[in-house]
Image (cartoon, rainbow, N blue to C red):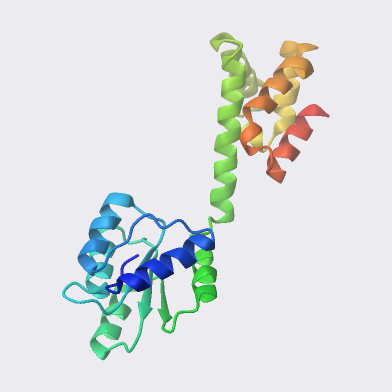
Amino acid sequence: MADDDKETVKLFSELLQSNGIKVVGKGFNGHDAVFLYQKLKPDVVYLDVTMPVFDGIYALEKIRELNLDAVIIMLADNITLNNEMAMNRLNPSAVIHEPIDINEIIKKTNELCAPTTDSEQHMRKTMVTLALKNTLLQLGTQELDKVTDILHKDYNCTLEDCYEYPQYLKQVLKDLFGESYQDYILNSLTENMKDIMSQKQIKEFLQELSV
């Protein structure tokens, strides 16, 4: 975040962090904000519109040049017509008018930074695929190759597709590993997924494999 009032920066940072938002960089003019953005690549930038020399509009424009999709929240008080026209052109993610309501800022931040359903689904699929590969590689590259070959030949799917079609994976693993499927393969897979086990969709995936 960037504001020319150091006390405001201190207080605002404390409020953000008490609401679960980690403040990774603090600046006191628009130049600081651009430098910190390039260095830290934060999820969201908070900019005071009115700062001396290099103001929030300067930072907004430069950060937009670096990343057109950057999440930038402007904190505004007594906006001039020129600043308003500039913001309309540069399209900040949100404009919060002073006096600042921290609840409004937290709500808007969560709305802007929350991952979409599609991105969450893609992330889960990627993590499940990695866990599957790790589990099979513990048995050896030949076993990984066998599983992927049978999936392709019998079901026309890849290891990545098994997140949506766990029944195919289950049948292939049972056919290949027999009784050791439940005792070793499934237990090993569960261990490799322990970091994401709390997610409902992951639990459902593993339940499909264990039935």
- At horizontal 36% and vertical 68% (from top left) the residue drawn is 9
12, 30: nearer the viewer: 12
Instruction: Using the image, determine if residue 58 lies above or below residue 39.
Output: below
55, 89: nearer the viewer: 55
23, 67: nearer the viewer: 23
Instruction: Using the image, determine if residue 87 lies above or below residue 142.
Output: below
Query: What percent of the width, then of the height, locates residue 53?
Result: 16, 74
Query: From this viewpoint, is residue 196 visible?
Result: yes
- At horizontal 76% and vertical 29% (from top left) the residue drawn is 209
- At horizontal 55% and vertical 56% (from top left) the residue drawn is 116
Q: Quadrant of residue 151?
A: top right
Query: What percent of the width, then of the height, locates residue 205?
Result: 72, 36
Residue 91 placement, left or right of 209: left
Q: Quadrant of residue 179?
A: top right
Residue 182 placement, left or right of 64: right
- At horizontal 63% and vertical 17% (from top left) the residue drawn is 147
Total marks shown come to 0
Query: What percent of the width, then of the height, locates residue 83?
Result: 26, 83
Question: As drawn, which residue projects farthest toward the right?
Answer: 211
Query: Looking at the rendering, in which quadrant would you find the N terminus?
Result: bottom left
Question: As drawn, which residue projects farthest toward the left?
Answer: 53
Instruction: Using the image, determine if residue 78 lies above or below residue 150.
Output: below
Query: From this viewpoint, is residue 158 visible?
Result: no
Residue 39 placement, left or right of 122: left
Residue 23 placement, left or right of 28: right
Query: Looking at the rendering, in which quadrant would you find the C terminus?
Result: top right
